[in-house]
Image (spheres, coloured by chain):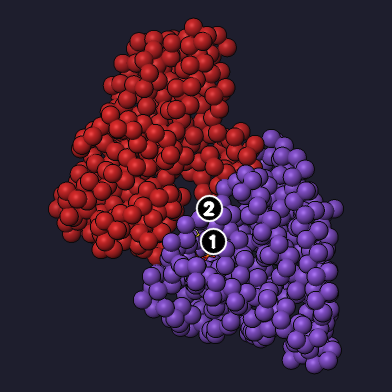
Chain colours: A purple, B red
Amino acid sequence: MATTRNRTAKAAAEAREGDVGPAPNGAAGADLGLDAETLLRFYREMTLIRLFEEAAQRGFRQGKIGGYLHLYIGQEAVAVGFLHEYRTGDHVITAYRDHAHALLLGSTPREVMAELFGKGTGLVKGKGGSMHLFDVENGLYGGYGIVGGHIPLGVGMAYAQAYQQTGGVTQLYFGDGAIHNAAFHEAANLSGLWGRDGLNPCLFILENNQYGMGTSVERATAMTDLSAKFDSYAIEHEDVDGMDLFAVLECAKRTVARVRESGRPYAVEVQTYRLSPHGAADFLERYRSKDEIAEARKRDPINLLEARLLEADVADEATLTAIRDEVKAVVEDAVTFADESPEPPLEELATDVYADGAAS
Amino acid sequence: MPVMTYREALRSAMAEEMTRDESVVILGEDIGIYGGTHLVTDKLIDQFGPRRVIDTPIAEGGFTGAAIGMAMAGMRPIVEMMTWNFSFQAVDQIVQNAAKVRYFSGGQVTVPLVIRGPNGGGVQLSAQHTHSLENFYGHFPGLKVVSPVTPHDVKGMMIEAIRDPNPIIFLEAGALYGTKGEVPEGEFTVPFGKARVAREGTDVTLIAYGRQVNMLLKVADTLAADGVAAEVIDLRSIRPFDEQTIVESVRKTHRAVVVQEQWRWFSVGSEVAALIQEQAFDDLDAPVERVSGAEVPAPYARNLEVAAFPSEQQIVDAARRAMYRG
Ligand SMILES: Cc1ncc(C[n+]2csc(CCOP(=O)(O)OP(=O)(O)O)c2C)c(N)n1
Ligand SMILES: [Mg+2]
């Protein structure tokens, strides 16, 4: 597997740690101290996620991808912004809408697409599929299919980081639908409690994309200010506009640092929007209007970023087109790789059920 | 007789009972405006309104428990589990309350409740979304567990379930919602605890429930070409359990193969095999064969998933072994 990687977690983290220095010409990221190269890398990352997801959708329609397929289209700025603050030793855990997280942490488009295609070259050997991407070497602890089920795991991982004094934090992603689940409330209470003693460096990243499947926030709870739910557990919180990459970056920088330094949890409710259907099989979308989607599209995070980059002269059209073309080729290569890869060997069926050996 | 899909048969049973009895309501995730993830409840909200077709947040433990409370207080709720995989979140309510409250209240309360949804795998949903839970729920006294496989049975058993004064675990064959079959006009019920002989035969008894029954019918064709007349039994109901139909069949054929998608250890097949040796030991000409899912969490990749579940070939081989033709 190592041979198929294009960069390791360490390299990715180092690249991010190098993101300092003033931006040219007082450009878009000036107040964040981001240079043109970094800004264009964000553009590339967001474009990669978008094109990757679109290719996955095609693969699903062609019957090359089975099971469920949940796309991140519209939410790109969230993971790009927060994972920019990822450092080696941090942990990341999320639900089933997980392709972007894997791609950003350093899993290659090839191995992620191959997983979706159920191939032996996939990120988890074809055993988990779209919902269960794991890349522990790069900090990704999954990829879970039961709504809310992973939230306690994130809190436990943060406890382990504090206990082991690694200096790491856990980025715990979950949706607006998951916040009504008992697992969330039990885990948030634990996190607040343990955090009081500096034992829970957990950043709760509530990706409020306005719907849990076909159920809008207002139809799921009478208390629609979702982040207020954290008040019950003495976890401080704020909101951020998840369509605006710069707002997310600023928020992420501050909040990740705060959690890292204090060992206490913090929560961010990210206001975002799922531009794609809930899953590739959600074709009716009776629960929202075409107008609503069209309205949200006006704030497509990639278009917003593009406009900012052009406006601030960080890039011209030609540069952005070149990036899109390059990313398109990367995605096409990933699809070809996935398509041509062999199925997992049948012996894999019975491996990984139990771990071998005694605990060390 | 009218022909309808499994999905339509299920929907018509619920709609008819809701029309007949105002105390029947249905609740679950995205069953109203969305129409149900598998469109089983499609448009029921237009007919019965949001007080009777209740969209819930993603809170299986909460709304299942609430439905138990509704049932105790005189309603007849139907809970839709979007899939049975999510029922683990509600197991405490189902096992600790629904199954036992009548007993530990000394018979003072009843829980007329149906919990229904798709069960079983076969569509590459991988480990967390693939379970076959007949034995799991069948273990608990106080629950009734059924697993209908034809449109006819799903309708008759749903009406039976809604009218039953006990909590019913209604496990639908998720892979078969679109399959068609004849369903009689008007209301009818299919009693629990009565297996169905899906095909008569004299040489070997093939036993299953859920979508594996259809597989057995194909296997019976294959065996027939080989001069073997297989009898196929569809259990339909896991608890209560029809011992008699199985024993009578084995007395006739002297050989039995039990097939299930679920894992072999502590499974429905184990119970069937034990029952046959208890009640028909002297009639057996061969050990009871069991064909089960591989002892692994469900994998995603198509080839691995196919390998994880019983195949027609495995069943044919098991039948041949039972006939000493292997
Ligand atoms: C316990 C449980 N119940 C139901 C489901 C089915 N389901 C999958 S995703 C989903 C919606 C979750 O919404 P949200 O948490 O907002 O995440 P989003 O899909 O918007 O990213 C539902 C109901 C599930 N996977 N797990
Ligand atoms: Mg959501």
Circle 2: residue type? Ala
Gap in angstroms between the C-alphas marked 2 and 1: 8 Å
Q: Where is residue A116 in the image (x, y as percent from the top left)?
A: 66, 50
Horizontal placement of A47 versus B46: left or right?
right
Q: Is residue B251 above or below residue B60?
A: above
Residue type at mark 1?
A: Pro
Give the residue number, with chain letter if any, for mark 1. Answer: A277
Q: Is residue A303 visible?
A: yes
Query: Height in image: B273 above or below A291?
Result: above
Residue drawn at (65%, 52%), measured in percent from left and top? Answer: A58
Identify the disc placed on residue A281. Answer: 2
Chain of the residue where label 2 is placed in the rendered structure: A
Vertical order, A204 against B313 (above or below): below
Tags 2 and 1 touching, CB below 8 Å? yes
Q: Image point 54% across, 30% down: which residue?
A: B310
Residue B93 falls left or right of residue B213: left
Dividing the picture into quadrants, the one containing residue A42 is bottom right
Residue A280 or B218: which is nearer the viewer?
Answer: A280
Relative to residue B143, is residue A269 drawn left or right?
right
Q: Where is residue B31 in the image (x, y as percent from the top left)?
A: 37, 57
Labels 2 and 1 positioned on one and the same chain: yes
